Image (spheres, rainbow, N blue to C red):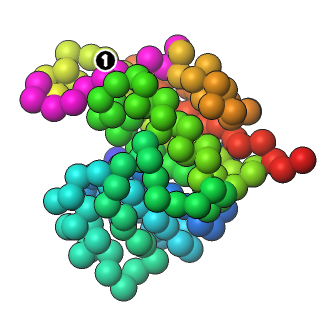
Amino acid sequence: MLNEKVIPWALKGTEMGGEILEIGPGPGLTTNILRQRFPRMTCIEIDQRLASSLSRRMQNTNVTVVEGSATDMPFPDNSFSGVVSFTMLHHVPSPQLQDQLIAEAFRVLRPGGTFAGTDSTLSPSFRLMHLWDTMVIVPPETFGARLEAAGFTDVFVDRVKKAFRFRARRPPAA
């Protein structure tokens, strides 16, 4: 499903370049697919156990795994040609921290780079899956304005029944 539907839907018509940052890969299901599509990937994962496990699995591949928070990334400005985030924004514990993550994605993107991804919308089944987990829903209706507030342009948000996709571009250098 990820390989045939979710990732193609999220990245359709999007140029990501060759140096990708994946925010919040969790166990690395999307990482397994993305690493075959891009020459170099870096993943930032806040959960120590998940970061360690993914790092071990990605040894001797084109993927580097960094344990850390996407709200305060240890990367220099303009580090990546593209940033992706798949169904993880709702795990960020507040709208303010979500906005900080968006600002960090903007900061680490090179001028002209794209931030793209997906997240889920509220549904009874989604709520049940997160009974004992962080779930701060990102309203797709306001997400575009939040991306623009961080400085992104060419913002696109597309909602379907239980999810939405987004993409936004850091303006090219003047």
Work out whether residue 140 or residue 172 is closer to the camera in this orientation and state it: 172
Which SS type dominates the magenta stretch? loop
Secondary element at tag 1: loop
Is residue 44 toward the left or the right of residue 41 in the image? left
For residue 159, above or below residue 69: above
In percent of width and height, residue 9 lies at 52, 41
Q: Residue at x 32, y 75 (%)?
A: 58
Q: Residue type at mark 1?
A: Leu
Q: Residue at x 65, y 37 (%)?
A: 168
Q: Residue furthest bottom?
A: 60
Work out whether residue 116 or residue 72 is closer to the camera in this orientation and state it: 72
Q: Residue furthest left?
A: 132
> Is disc 1 surrounded by few (<14), some (14 to 19) or many (20+) residues within 10 Å?
some
Q: Quick check: is 132 in the magenta stretch?
A: yes
Q: Specify the quadrant of the image occupied by residue 18.
A: bottom right
Q: Quick check: is 81 in the magenta stretch?
A: no
In percent of width and height, residue 54 lies at 26, 66
For residue 77, above or below residue 70: below
What segment is highlighted magenta in the picture? 131-141
Work out whether residue 59 or residue 7 is closer to the camera in this orientation and state it: 59
**Residue 72 visible to the viewer:** yes
Is residue 23 toward the left or the right of residue 103 in the image? left
Q: Residue at x 49, y 20 (%)?
A: 140
Work out whether residue 161 or residue 166 is closer to the camera in this orientation and state it: 166
Is residue 119 toward the left or the right of residue 159 in the image? left
Residue assigned mark 1: 122
In percent of width and height, residue 126 lies at 22, 24
In percent of width and height, residue 96 lies at 43, 25
The number of discs equals 1
